[in-house]
Structures are given as C-alpha cells and as structure tokens.
Amino acid sequence: MLLAYSTVGGNGEMSFLQQQTRLTERLGVDRTWDTLRQGLADIYKSNTLGQGRYMELYNLVYQYCTSNNLTLPLHSRSLLSGCELLGEQLYTRLRDFLRDFLHRMAATGLESQDEALLQYYKVAWNNYIFSSAVTHHIFLYMNRHWIRRVREDKNDVYEVYSLAMLMWRDSLLVELGSRVTEAVVRLITRERDGDPINTQLVSCIKQSYIDMGVENRRLRCGRLDYYRYSDVAKFQL
C-alpha cells in the first residue's frame, strides 16, 4: 500500500519530508565522495591498500547505490525525483578526479623526452591500469546497476575501467601523446639502423594504445582504433 503525502505545503514551500530527503541526498553525495576521493588518491599513488580499507570503500559504493535507489529498474527509478542525478553526480566526480590526476601526470611527463619519457610512460601506464582495475572493482555494484542501465540510453557513460582508459586517451595523451609516439618512432628507427634498443618500451606503448581503444557500439569504434591510426602502427610492430 502506498502512502500519499504532500510534497509542497499550502504556501508553496517544500514539506518537511522533502526537505529532509534533499538534505540526506546532498550529504550522502558529499560525504560519500569525500571518503572515496581519499581512497582513490591512495590507490592512484600506488599506496598499499589493506583489505579492510578496500572493503570500506567497496561497501561505501554499495551503500550509496542501495540507499539512493540506484539499483531499482529504470521504470521504477524514473518515479523517484533526483535518483538518476545522484548516480550521475558520483560518476562525474570520479571522471573529474581521473582527469585532474592525468593532467598532473602529463605535466610531469613533459619534463622528459626520448627514452626517459618512454620509461616514465611505461611505469605510469602500468601503475595506472593496476589502480584502475582496483577502482573498477570498488565501483562494481555501480557498474552492474546504475551504469549498465544508463548505458541503454546514453552513449557517453562507461563502466569504470573503460572510463579510465578513455580518460587516459582523452586527457593524458592529448597533452603527451605526440611526444610519446615520436619517441617510439625514433627508437624503432634506431633498431632498424642496427642499434640495440629496449624493446619492452615499444611493446608497452603499443599495448597501451590498443587497450585504450574503448569500444563504442553506436559509433562503431573498436579497441584497435587508437592504435590503428597512430604512427606507431605504421611500423607493423
């Protein structure tokens, strides 16, 4: 049995229940993200994350999703004002966190060049994909519910690991990509001229270009697209 209640008083003001609901939602988003942000900062700095801290972050996302009705079917969530917005707010804050982190990483990379740049890129990439895999599992409940359902109607929402790959491509490589590619090409040229090189660096850059090709069903883009159109691919490594 559904209980009806007035959401707006006779004088046009919100009811007490509606005021409390909005207050709870606002604090829920802010407090949830504040704790998650601190955890993500440790994860992406490659700090050790104990099992207890991992479960704390995982449970926090789980509680946020369930308490804000993000796990309900789409037709049910549409009846709850602000429900979709709460999912979008958390997703947007994660995306912005990754963008800011990668911008700082790119700025550090710009201080290096040639093989030193590729060494920096290799370490940064390996750390990033590991950290992003951990983050993906922390947000697993959101992946399975809010993100999966929103993707039915929106083409710019991705599961967390795919989002991380997309942000690497559209944030870090926008600033650093041309220099990395040029350094790889110079390294390959040296090898073809008979000089010994660190082939692991070349393999790492190639694989990262492949992995960041996030599949997009509607735009018919595949995983190999970024690599295929890069200068690195022209050498048929």
Image (tube, grey):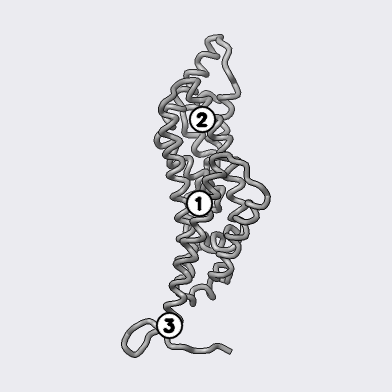
Considering every residue shown, the one lying at the far top of the view is: 194
Q: Quadrant of the C terminus?
A: top right
Q: Earlier in the sequence, mark 1 or mark 3?
A: 3
Which quadrant holds residue 142?
bottom right
Q: Residue at x 52, y 23 (%)?
A: 235
List the residue tagged with mark 1.
Answer: 37
Vertical comparison of 95 with 182: above or below: below
Indicate which disc, 2 or 1, sits on the residue closer to the N terminus.
1
* Circle 1 SS class: helix
Q: Which residue is mark 2?
A: 121
- Under mark 1, the amino acid is Arg
Report crowding for label 3: few under 14, some 14 to 19, many 20 or more residues within 10 A (C-alpha): few
| SS at circle 3 | helix
| Crowd tier of the residue under label 1, counting other residues whose Cα lies within 10 Å: few below 14, some 14–19, many 20 or above | some
Identify residue type, mark 2. Tyr
The CA distance from mark 2 to mark 1 is 24 Å
Q: Earlier in the sequence, mark 2 or mark 3?
A: 3
Q: Is 115 placed above or below 158 here?
A: above
In the rendered structure, the answer to whether residue 59 lies left or right of residue 95 reads: right
The image's mark for residue 8 is none
Q: Nearer the viewer, residue 194 or 166?
A: 166
Residue 11 makes an appearance in the image: yes
Which percent across, then down, holds residue 65?
56, 65
Q: Specify the label residue 16 is tagged with.
A: 3
Quadrant, the N terminus: bottom right
